[in-house]
Image (cartoon, coloured by chain):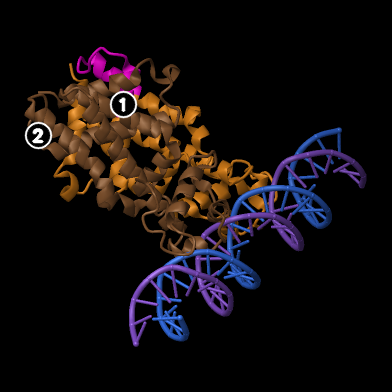
Chain colours: A orange, B brown, C purple, D blue
Amino acid sequence: MTGPSKRPYHHGDLRRVILDTAMTMLAEPEGVNFTLRAVSRRAGVSHAAPYKHFEDKAALLTELALVGFDRLTATLDKSAKEAPKGFRSKFFAAASAYLDFARQNPSLYRLMFGGEFGTISAHLDPRALKTFDFAVALIELGQRQGQVRERPSRGQATACWAQIHGLTMLELNGLLQPEKVGDNATELALSTLFEGLQT
Amino acid sequence: MTGPSKRPYHHGDLRRVILDTAMTMLAEPEGVNFTLRAVSRRAGVSHAAPYKHFEDKAALLTELALVGFDRLTATLDKSAKEAPKGFRSKFFAAASAYLDFARQNPSLYRLMFGGEFGTISAHLDPRALKTFDFAVALIELGQRQGQVRERPSRGQATACWAQIHGLTMLELNGLLQPEKVGDNATELALSTLFEGLQT
DNA sequence: CTTTTATGTTGACATCGTCTACATGAGCTT
DNA sequence: AAGCTCATGTAGACGATGTCAACATAAAAG
């Protein structure tokens, strides 16, 4: 299903190869500080080849961030599908899936939300906003089930996203260790918000 | 009170001058992508001079981040002092001060929490943890006033920090515009958490 | 078959972070 | 006061990077 859709020119899908290579290097220790030239080398093309597919390095990073949003949204959708149908289960399943995604892709997650790589524009992209749409849908489900207050769903979804995003950042930065914040700080923080949502 | 405390050597306080210059450049459009050599130029010293005071660029950035935490903590302390003595007032005053700090120093704030500049170590520094201590103290005040549940204060402080940090990131990334999240999303998100804290 | 044009390569340029060798002068030792 | 020492600052170099312009090539359009 992921085969060469067109194989249009000389190399064949170089854009995809560059994207994949860059995504791989993003996951390596060096993180976002990989080099365009190193991507080219690993992809087996000349150092200027990427410029035929991306305006500059920032554009490549922006596309990577958008792919990240695609994957995050897919992960959340999957978690919602697999969880029991109650709002509470889906809420905590989604939070857990979100955190796991960030833990498994820390550099990608930071790139998505960092904003210091010319990536700011990515957040206004529909692909990024789909993640927010997921949160809105979840809240509205809770409202239909009578478990969430009848306040504006987008405002409450903002509260959810802010909470899980904040927790994620603290986790990625190593601040959620038990000796700093106590045991089960993550669960407690999520529960606190959950109770604020409840009717 | 800010005069030359020692003026120890050739230049006199070059370390401080470099730090101030870098902090200024961090606030300019280029943000964190300023150049060490540009800092040297603006400070009027040779391009290698900073290396007598900072191991490398990452060390400079780390120190900037720590200064940021110092300032943030000072801002929060001030807000708590000036607000009425009730927990609710201090909670929302602190949240507002936190958001304002980030709005006025977006690049600095991102540097403090970005983690992709060799800055991760900064979060374990006592100067950074003081910000967390503020949140813990605030929660414990609320508990003494009988307004916050008798759960572990550090866990609830984590919830608060995560929430305000998440909101801040969303705000800095331009996601909190009314047409995206509805009116008063920030206030609603804070209120939701606040109610989760309440007894 | 020829022309066009998207794709890839080569080589160059300015700039960067960092290192090494060297210069300078403040402050301690005598 | 004279000299020494070492922290501080400078000059120059190195390899590497992002990006651009000139050129090469082959797929697609005619």
A124 or B50: nearer the eye? Answer: B50
Identify the residue under disc 2: B151
Q: What amino acid is at disc 1?
A: Ser
- Residue at 27% over, 34% down: B76
Residue under disc 1 on the same chain as residue under disc 2: yes
Say whether residue A28 is visible.
no
Give above or below for B127 relative to A80: below
Q: Which residues are magenta?
A: A136-161
Q: What amino acid is at disc 2?
A: Arg
Viewer-nearest of discs 1 and 2: 1
- Residue at 48% over, 40% down: B27
Give above or below for B142 relative to A98: above
Expressed as whole percent of the image width and height from the top left, the position of residue D2 reads 47, 84
A144 or A165: nearer the eye? Answer: A165
Magenta-colored stretch includes residue A138:
yes
Expressed as whole percent of the image width and height from the top left, the position of residue A2 reads 51, 43
**Contact, CB < 8 Å: mark 1 with mark 2?**
no
Expressed as whole percent of the image width and height from the top left, the position of residue B189 reads 29, 23
- Residue at 26% over, 38% down: A96
Gap in Å between the C-alphas at discs 1 and 2? Answer: 25 Å
Identify the residue under disc 1: B96
Residue A165 placement, left or right of B155: right
**Main secondary-structure element of the magenta-colored stretch:** helix
Q: Earlier in the sequence, mark 1 or mark 2?
A: 1
Residue B11 placement, left or right of B192: right
